[in-house]
Amino acid sequence: MADVALRPIRDADLDALFEQRRDPKSVHMAAFTAEDPDDRDAFDAHISRLLAAPDVTVRAITRDGHLVGSVASFVMEGRTEITYWVDRSAWGQGVASQALALFLQMLNVRPVYARTASDNAGSLRVLQKAGFTMIGTEVSYAAGRGAEVDEAIFRLG
């Protein structure tokens, strides 16, 4: 099994993270993405805000020492939510599941919430494997698809 680890985001990671978030298939699957995944200035501004925010925790995901994504927690409407992004080259290999398990071990907050497009089977499996329970659905606008999308809402703890 690959060695999956978490570490702080480094400036040297930003180019790769930006490229991962521009992949059209990944953007479609994630659905809830930036309005324009090709806007580097918006990406840089977003990452800068995340890294500076006291209620946000962001970690790089590495596999065998190579950057393959990121995982984060943030507070929205008083609830701690998690989000993750794994490079498409690592899909289906347990990387997201391992990274989320590691992140949840370091995150001392419960309950934790997560959301995913209802048709994102991989993300649904990752969340369920981590112990999240689906608590509802809603229809939300997804910039990555330019349309309203059914969104599954999960809770852990």
Image (cartoon, helix red, strand yellow):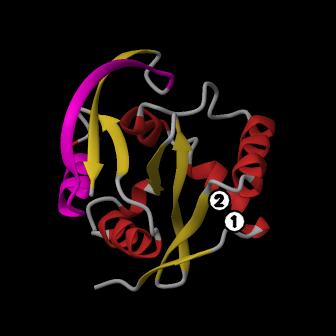
CA neighbours of label 1 inside 10 A, class few (<14), some (14 to 19), many (20+): some
Contact, mark 2 vs mark 1 (Cβ under 8 Å) = yes
SS at mark 1 in the image: helix
Q: Is residue 123 magenta?
A: yes
Residue placed most toward the observer, 149 or 21: 149
Question: How many numbered marks are there?
Answer: 2
Highlighted range, magenta: 122-143
The image shows residue 67 at horizontal and vertical percentages of: 56, 71
Quadrant holding the N terminus: bottom left
Q: Is residue 28 above or below residue 20?
A: above
Q: Is residue 136 magenta?
A: yes
Looking at the image, residue 152 sits to the left or right of residue 63; the answer is left
The image shows residue 28 at horizontal and vertical percentages of: 41, 32
Residue at horizontal 72 percent and vertical 57 percent from the top: 51
The image shows residue 104 at horizontal and vertical percentages of: 39, 68
Residue at horizontal 77 percent and vertical 55 percent from the top: 52
List the residue tagged with mark 2.
16
CA neighbours of label 2 inside 10 A, class few (<14), some (14 to 19), many (20+): some
Q: Amino acid at mark 1?
A: Asp
List the residue tagged with mark 1.
13
